[in-house]
Image (spheres, grey):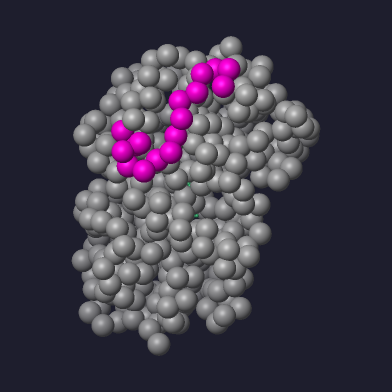
Amino acid sequence: MMRVLVVGAGVVGLTAAYLLQREGADVVIVEREPGPAAGASAVNGAQLSYSYVAPLADPAVLKKLGALLFDSESPLKFRPRFELAQWSWALGFVGACDRDRSRATTRALLGLSFLSREVTEGILRDERIDCRFTRPGKLVVYPDDAALHHAAEQLEFQRGLGCVQELLSREQCVAKEPALAEYAPRIAGGVWTPGEAAADCGAFCRALAAKLVERGARLVLGDEALEIHAGDELARVRTQNGAFEAERVVLANGSRAAELGRRVGLRLPVYPLKGYAVTLKQRAAPFALRGSVTDVRRRVVFAPLGDEVRVAGFVELAGHDETLPRERIDALLGAARDVLGLDTRGDVQPWFGFRPSTPTSLPILGASPKRTLFLDVGHGMLGWTLAGGSARLVVDALFGRRPPIDASAFAYGAQ
Ligand SMILES: Cc1cc2nc3c(=O)[nH]c(=O)nc-3n(C[C@H](O)[C@H](O)[C@H](O)COP(=O)(O)OP(=O)(O)OC[C@H]3O[C@@H](n4cnc5c(N)ncnc54)[C@H](O)[C@@H]3O)c2cc1C
């Protein structure tokens, strides 16, 4: 039985651990926090957004660089720091804002997201995990004709790659999602994707962790991996509380991947992109949110989770800044009132998390230059959506099998 140690009990590490265990590996998961799903996977936007995988780096973003730097209301925010990692990430990002590159990335990520749909939804079915999963479709609404035109071009491109999407007028958007009725004058139209799903990522992680432990995996909580010595046959991981030996190690520690990678001699361009979320009560029918909605004006996403709505947004390039500024939460609540007419009074449980992001939005998956160390990091805005396919590719690489899709875009060094 091969012993595999997974570093990180977020959705990415746990999904990889699950597939490893199913293939007969003896799995140990080391997590520095006192419970699973303590990082970005705890709350997030709840969207399984299989067709919206286009990278953040896009030529259109370059035109907004001034707002990024100077507008405090901007949904994308760059707060300069004296930090090499931040500047080299930002330069890599600017370099990736190229149309052909963005399209190649979209193509690669769609392959991974379709594979993820099979894997993650297979796990949900096989394990009967209750995480408020629904497939209500997703509507992305655009503020003006120029943005809608850009979206229509992307839709045409993605149609050739197996995406089923439809361009809607303002009136059709309201017919699809009556909760948008009052906001309709402020949108030009939208793109509707019927196959998209929503589910509570934190609940999925906790259920999966429990299944893993029930079947013999060891979940070591409150212990931080400090160093990895990846030999040719055996890897040794030194932690805060001790040490572990394993035949293989899978690095899945989210936004902290670059730090740990550096200590083993790897360059992992993963930087935290901070975002925020709140969870609110649904409105009563007929104005309850039916499906997921993204408001492109504010870059805020809304997802229905049973009798609640998850509201998430903002992207801040500001390191691991642990503050929770009131104005960000107020802006999310304002969006919930304006866009969906939600009642935002009462307890709203504000949250922030760090998306483990590469400049190109391509995760780093599979083999590393160290024979015993495998990588499952850098999932950025879409880790909940991409965890299943990523786990499949990493586990196949670990067992020396051919991947089910072209995985070259996710190889170490390709980002
Ligand atoms: C506001 C917001 C909204 C989002 N919305 C969506 C969405 O709608 N759909 C979507 O698909 N994705 C979304 N995401 C992205 C998604 O949440 C992340 O990509 C995903 O959770 C990353 O999972 P992970 O397991 O790699 O990282 P994490 O969940 O952060 O897990 C990494 C784990 O590793 C642990 N760790 C770190 N270092 C060590 C160490 N040295 N030793 C031991 N343990 C360690 C951490 O404590 C953590 O538990 C969103 C993210 C944010 C912040």
Compare residues 10 and 22 and report the one nearer the observer.
22
Q: Residue 248 in the image: x percent, y percent? A: 34, 76
Q: Residue 207 in the image: x percent, y percent? A: 62, 65
- Residue at horizontal 65 percent and vertical 36 percent from the top: 290
Q: How many marks?
A: 0
Q: In this rendering, would 414 be left or right of 209?
A: left
**Residue at the farthest top position:** 185
- Residue at horizontal 45 percent and vertical 14 percent from the top: 144
Instruction: Report if residue 293 is visible in the image.
Output: yes
Q: Is residue 166 magenta?
A: yes
Q: Residue 26 in the image: x percent, y percent? A: 45, 82
Residue 68 image-quadrant placement? top left
User: Relative to 236, is 287 above or below?
Assistant: above
- Residue at horizontal 53 percent and vertical 64 percent from the top: 123
Instruction: Report if residue 86 is visible in the image.
Output: no
Q: In this rendering, would 130 be left or right of 193?
A: right
**Residue at the farthest bottom position:** 1
Q: Which residues are magenta?
A: 157-172
Q: Residue 35 in the image: x percent, y percent? A: 60, 64
Residue 12 image-quadrant placement? bottom left
- Residue at horizontal 45 percent and vertical 25 percent from the top: 167
Quadrant the N terminus occupies = bottom left
Q: In this rendering, would 232 be left or right of 309?
A: left
Q: Is residue 364 magenta?
A: no
Residue 312 image-quadrant placement? top right
User: Relative to 33, is 344 above or below?
Assistant: above
